[in-house]
Image (cartoon, rainbow, N blue to C red):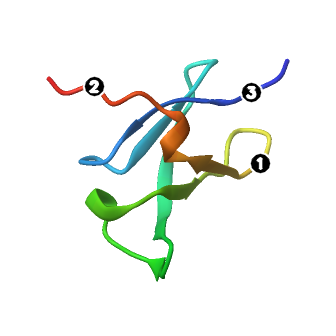
Amino acid sequence: MALWVEAINRITNLAVLNDGQILPITHWFEDGGECEAEDATSCVCGPCESGYWYTVDLSEMDGVMQ
């Protein structure tokens, strides 16, 4: 089964995979390097149950505010 990041929460620093696994986001990045979550254009999360890490291009995700 292929896994991918389905959702990102910048407040809790958590990512949700399409199979329901919840992973910690370990690093936030912008063009100049590491940054705070609110300024990030990408992030790294993991590891999942299989030991994989995921990089996420945040421009590819739709923002939702509640």
Q: CA distance from mark 2 to mark 3?
A: 22 Å
Residue 54 higher or lower than 64, as above or below: below
- The residue that disc 1 covers is 52
Q: Amino acid at mark 3?
A: Leu
SS class, disc 1: loop
Marks 3/1 in contact by CB < 8 Å: the verdict is yes
| Residue at numbered disc 2 | 64
The foreground one among 61 and 44 is: 61
Q: What amino acid is labelled 1 in the image?
A: Tyr
* Residue at image location 77% in from the left, 48% down from the top: 52
Relative image position of residue 28 (x, y in whole percent): 45, 65
Q: Which residue is mark 3?
A: 3
Q: Classify residue 41 as left or right of residue 48.
A: left
Report the quarter where the C terminus lies: top left
Name the outermost residue toward the left: 66
17 left or right of 27? right
Horizontal arrangement in the rendering, residue 2 relative to residue 14 (left or right): right
